[in-house]
Amino acid sequence: MMHDEQGGIGVRFVGGGDAFGSGGRFQACTFVQAASTRLLLDCGASSLVALKRLGMDPGAVDSVLVSHLHGDHFGGIPFLVLDGQFGRCERPLLVAGPPGLQERVLQAMEVLFPGSSGVQRRFAVQWLGLPERQAVHLGSLVVTAFPVVHPSGAPAYAFRLAYQDKVLAYSGDTEWTEALVEAAHGADLFLCECYTVERQVKFHLSYAAIRAHRARLGCRRLILTHLGADALARLDEIVDEIAQEGERLRL
């Protein structure tokens, strides 16, 4: 994992792809560390594989923060829980996100591994439904959720994560909405979905929309993630940074 000897917020990109593995990239997952808190920002279905490929210990994760209830953003949680169970993990796991998260994850566990949701474990799994626009402490991080536009059978969120004087913002999946300005304003880093370059796909962000509103976002640094096939085919037209799986940075 990462060490926090320098303070601030440590970030490592674990998965920066879309739901369909375009370009061979893993699904949404970013490792965030602030002091002793080790958090996954989204945990798509491929995230356990991605963590292990990078040599990261899934058992060291103490929190998962989910933006919305699509499988490429929460579908790795059943595998993370079961890996901890078989690895005899004793560290409690907090899973936070939109209302309905607990029910959806437990349903997924029962579909994938019948009987797994009720098994007695050495560690507790705690669930937290996040309200909109209210600061909530997740370990060392203060998290604020902002409603965005991406139907998944439950609310979808963008996030603002703060520790000391550092702020990491994350768009989740969404079409353009003014809530992104709220989430990103003044952030040291805004990790933003970029599904296409110009083509408009309902409930997703294009690079053209991001560039049109770039100045209004007010973030110090912008890094693009969740790139679809269209964006990956036109990388020469993208001038902003792109999240590279395995890359580390510190805010």
Image: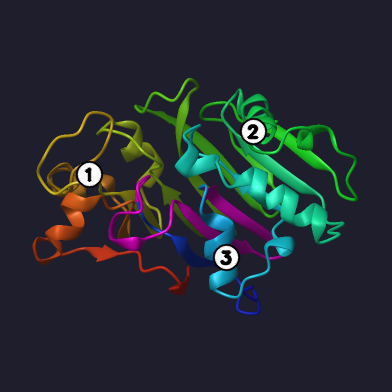
Which numbered disc flags the more N-terminal residue, 2 or 3? 3
Asked whether, in this view, residue 102 is left or right of residue 167, the answer is right
* Nearer to the camera, 235 or 208: 235
Q: Is residue 10 left or right of residue 38?
A: left
- Quadrant housing residue 51: bottom right
**Relative to 8, is 152 on the left or the right?**
left
- Residue range of the region highlighted in magenta in the rendering: 18-43
Distance between the alpha carbons at the discs numbered 1 and 3:
34 Å
Q: Which residue is mark 2?
A: 105
* Residue 47 located within the stretch drawn in magenta: no
Tag 2's secondary structure? Answer: helix
Secondary element type, mark 1: helix
Q: Of the numbered discs in the image, which one, if any, rests on residue 51?
A: 3
Query: Residue 157: image x %, image y %?
Result: 46, 33
Residue pointed to by mark 1: 216
Nearer-N-terminus badge (1/3): 3
Residue 221 appearing in the image: no
- Colour style of the rendered protein structure: rainbow
Q: Position of residue 20 (x, y in %)?
A: 35, 47
